[in-house]
Image: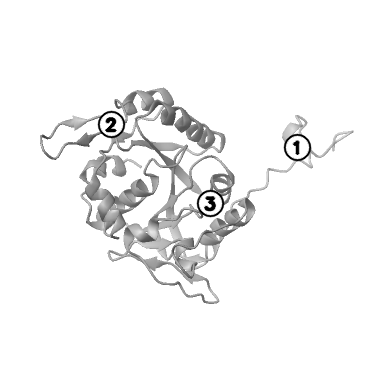
Amino acid sequence: MAENCDHNCESCGVDCAQRTAPESLLEPVNELSRVGKVIAVVSGKGGVGKSMVTSLLAVCAAKSGRKVGVLDADITGPSIPRAFGVHGRPYGTDKGMPALESRDGIKVMSINLLLDNETDPVVWRGPIIASAVKQFWTDVIWGDLDYLFVDMPPGTGDVPLTVFQSLPVNGVVVVTTPQDLVGMIVEKAVNMAGMMHVPVLGLVENMAWYECPCCGQKLNIFGESHVEEQGMRLGVGNTVSLPLDPTVAAACDSGKVEDVDVSRLWEFAQNI
């Protein structure tokens, strides 16, 4: 061992016998689970339809014959169970807590399934929220999944950091809208993924236009679409634009997201 060693291997350039690799923070998945790919769906800010996009991507994967689960990591704003029409309280065993299933077999776990009332607020500090997300990975019985989609909270705080460090995330999908302000904030989410060495698999521009039901004219309510230009600037080739569609919102509100036509997302979803 070198003289005057401070035991900080990251800053040391000496080839030392005591050198150790950085300790992995990855948590083991529940022993009764086998998860193929973990895809995190992120956004720089709230209100862009991230949970809706997460749900639709899960539906795409399920319709293509994959076994799919959705982990609702948006602890203080959970909406995944409502979109899939999943209700009831999971039961616990000595092996863990089985995820609940939607009508078409998509497995779901969310803090809302563990509350006495769905409208009860979750008033927890960051470390407790982060711990709950880790338990959804380590303690929930997901079974055999090809894809686990993680609906992340907006921003780049405790929970996204916990997910990137604790779960074996294979890639992220970033959700945005046409507004310039949102586009700027999206770069923060992309940059965080880069810092965590997680590839960005695609960019979804939500609410890109609204089609008038009377004349069929496309109205750019939130501004002109820039998703392709933004994708090129960020080095993301897999992009797609989705309209502001009241029928999709109504399906999510009524727990029937699995009935939504996902053809606009189909090609995009096959490339993640």
**Which residue is under mark 2?**
221
- Going by the numbered disc 3, the residue's amino acid type is Leu
Query: Mark 2 near mark 1, Cβ–Cβ under 8 Å?
Result: no
Q: Residues within 10 Å of mark 3 (few under 14, many from 20)?
A: many
The mark nearer the N terminus, 3 or 2, is: 3
Q: Secondary structure at mark 3?
A: loop
- Going by the numbered disc 2, the residue's amino acid type is Ile
Horizontally, residue 35 falls left or right of residue 266, namely right
Which mark is drawn over residue 9? 1
Residue 152 in the image: state x and y as whole percent: 47, 48
Q: Secondary structure at mark 2?
A: loop
Which mark is drawn over residue 29? none
Q: Quadrant of residue 182?
A: top left
Residue in front for this viewpoint, 115 or 68: 115
Which residue corresponds to the image point at 46% horizontal and 53% vertical from the top-left? 77
Q: Decide: is 159 above or below 206.
A: below
Q: Can residue 146 be seen from the camera position used here?
A: no
Which residue corresponds to the image point at 75% horizontal and 29% vertical from the top-left? 13
Residue depth check, mark 3 versus mark 2: number of the one nearer the observer = 2
Horizontally, residue 10 falls left or right of residue 65, namely right
Residue in front for this viewpoint, 159 or 20: 159
- Going by the numbered disc 1, the residue's amino acid type is Cys
Q: Decide: is 184 above or below 169.
A: above
Residue in front for this viewpoint, 4 or 40: 40
Residue 258 in the image: state x and y as whole percent: 26, 57
**Which residue is under mark 3?**
167
Which residue corresponds to the image point at 75% horizontal and 40% vertical from the top-left? 19
Label 3, label 2: how many angstroms apart (C-alpha)? Answer: 37 Å
